[in-house]
Image (tube, grey):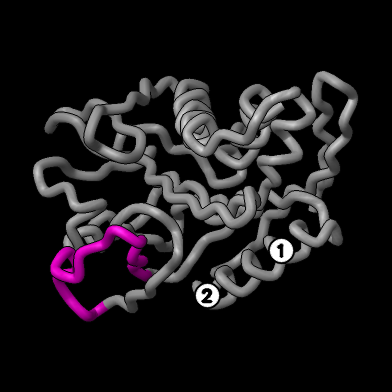
Amino acid sequence: MVRLRWRGRVGYSCPMEWKITQGLTTYPDALATMAARVEAIQQGKAEELVWLVEHPPLYTLGTSAKVGDVLGEAIPTYETGRGGQVTYHGPNQRVVYLILDLKKRAAAKGQEPDLRAYVKQLEQWIILTLAQFGIEGFLRDGRVGVWVNTPRGEAKIAALGVRVQKWVTSHGIALNVNPDLSHYAGIVPCGIREFGVTSLHQLGVMATMDEVDAVLKQQFGKVFG
């Protein structure tokens, strides 16, 4: 566990916990942990948290999910309060949950909190991280997530979905390091049928999870302060 300290332009100091959980975290445990931390931050009783986990194979349904986009029952499916549609989580995928106080962060800069700006920060964070591994990530209108070019065309390498309660965020991003991509066959990822998914390893970047975590941490400061 590492605590970081973020400082705004007007001198506001915001302590932050950077936590990596080894092994596989169940989805109900993740939801409960996020909910408790959100409430504690809202009450001024806890610091912000960036939490890096891996999950056992599972599908999650965002608030815009269509039941028909889950094509099978072999893998557990969970409803969640985040935005977005259906996605997959599993071993060797780096999931990062961010519990941040957007109101305090914006006030430190003399600004109003902005959810759209936060989503753009998440996208930029992923793109900068990919660039450190020599991969060009990009966005596409009408397609959520971060995309890359592959020999078979464009494919998604990272998903994102957020929830905001009284300007405290939860949920976050999922970056495919080396997950079992065959599990995506059980869903229509984010409601998009025309394009596939890929991973760092499939693109020939044999990075370890520790190496990915180090780059994520390095690039986090460039994007979020």
**Whether residue 220 is situated above or below residue 45 in the rendered picture:** above
Q: Is residue 15 left or right of residue 205?
A: right
Name the image quarter holding the C terminus: top right
Q: Quadrant of residue 60?
A: bottom left
Q: Position of residue 57 (x, y in %)?
A: 38, 69
Q: Which residues are magenta?
A: 58-74
Residue in front for this viewpoint, 162 or 159:
162
* Amino acid under disc 1: Arg
Distance from the alpha carbon under mark 2 to that under mark 1: 17 Å
Q: Position of residue 89 (x, y in %)?
A: 40, 61
N-terminal-most mark, 2 or 1: 2
**Whether residue 220 is situated above or below residue 92 in the rendered picture:** above
Residue in front for this viewpoint, 77 or 35:
35
Secondary structure category for the residue under label 1:
helix
Q: Which residue is mark 2?
A: 26
Determine the residue positioned at 83% across, 45% down.
Answer: 3
Does the stretch in magenta take in 87?
no
Determine the residue positioned at 36% across, 25% down.
Answer: 137
Q: Which residue is mark 1?
A: 37
Determine the residue positioned at 61% across, 74% down.
Answer: 32
Q: Quadrant of residue 194?
A: top left
Secondary structure category for the residue under label 2:
loop
Q: Is residue 57 left or right of residue 23?
A: left
